[in-house]
Image (cartoon, rainbow, N blue to C red):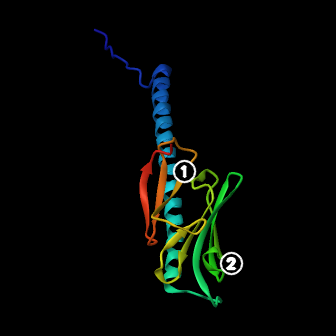
């Protein structure tokens, strides 16, 4: 009897390799899209926190009566504006001129939002925190019960907006994600 050995071929066929590569590609594509959505959501949350912090800082400076080089402090305000698709907000010190801040307005800090982050509502707004904790007003010197700044990441679907609420007393609260429509 001849000594017969069964030889097994070791390795993978081209077909098996293509199947595995296809599965890996599909899983990577799905994972990447979820990661991209997650990172854009976190970017929106981060920018909302930055804006809320700027509002809080303006409120704190007003409450403490931080006058710097101002003889007749009205308060500190945040001015929201856009130029094309680029949004920014500016913290300003208001001196004299009553609630209209008409006499002396000093820019303290300017913040720019990333290109895909926008303010949905209000379209342009000024939130003034009156000195020594006398509350907050928005636009046209109207006293506010509750004002909302809604921010949106245009890279995400319409269910991804965040509200920042400011009440009459100047309390600032970041809301949860809401539907933008």
Mark 1 and mark 2 in contact? Answer it, CB < 8 Å: no
Q: How many marks?
A: 2
Q: Measuring 66% from the left and 80% from the top, which residue is drawn there? A: 97
Whichever of labels 1 and 2 marks the residue nearer the N terminus, that label is 2
Q: Residues within 10 Å of mark 2 (few under 14, many from 20)?
A: some
Residue 13 or residue 25, whichever sits in front: 25
Residue 109 or residue 11, whichever sits in front: 109
Compared with residue 115, is residue 95 higher up or lower down, i.e. above or below?
below
Q: Measuring 45% from the left and 22% from the top, which residue is drawn there? A: 16
For mark 2, give the secondary structure: strand
Q: Residue furthest left?
A: 1
Q: Measuring 46% from the left and 71% from the top, which residue is drawn there? A: 170
* Residue 104 as seen in the image, left or right of residue 31: right
Between tags 1 and 2, which lies in front? 2
Compared with residue 131, is residue 48 higher up or lower down, i.e. above or below?
above
Compared with residue 83, is residue 52 higher up or lower down, i.e. above or below?
below
Q: Measuring 53% from the left and 86% from the top, which residue is drawn there? A: 65
Compared with residue 104, is residue 18 higher up or lower down, i.e. above or below?
above
Q: Residues within 10 Å of mark 1 (few under 14, many from 20)?
A: many
* Residue 60 as seen in the image, left or right of residue 95: left
Quadrant in the picture for residue 123: bottom right
* Residue 166 as seen in the image, left or right of residue 85: left
For mark 1, give the secondary structure: strand
Percent across and percent down for residue 134 are 48, 79
Percent across and percent down for residue 116 are 61, 50
Q: Which residue is mark 1?
A: 152
Q: Which residue is mark 2?
A: 105
Q: What mark, if any, has residue 138 been given in the picture? A: none
Percent across and percent down for residue 118 are 60, 53
Q: State how far apart marks 1 and 2 are (Cα).
A: 29 Å
Quarter of the image with the N terminus in it: top left
Percent across and percent down for residue 120 are 57, 51
């Amino acid at each position: 009897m001849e000594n017969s050995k069964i030889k097994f071929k070791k390795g993978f066929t081209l077909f098996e390799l293509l199947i595995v590569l296809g599965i890996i590609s599909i899983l990577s594509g799905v994972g990447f899209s979820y990661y991209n959505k997650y990172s854009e959501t976190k970017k929106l949350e981060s920018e909302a926190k930055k804006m809320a912090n700027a509002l809080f800082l303006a409120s704190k400076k007003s409450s403490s009566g931080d006058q710097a080089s101002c003889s007749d402090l009205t308060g500190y305000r945040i001015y929201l504006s856009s130029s094309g698709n680029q949004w920014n907000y500016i913290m300003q010190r208001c001196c004299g001129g009553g609630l209209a801040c008409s006499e002396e307005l000093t820019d303290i800090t300017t913040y720019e939002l990333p290109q895909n982050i926008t303010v949905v509502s209000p379209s342009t707004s000024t939130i003034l925190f009156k000195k020594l904790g006398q509350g907050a007003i928005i636009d046209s010197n109207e006293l506010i019960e509750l004002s909302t700044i809604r921010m949106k990441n245009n890279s995400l679907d319409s269910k991804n907006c965040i509200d920042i609420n400011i009440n009459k007393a100047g309390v600032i609260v970041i809301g949860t994600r809401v539907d933008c429509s």
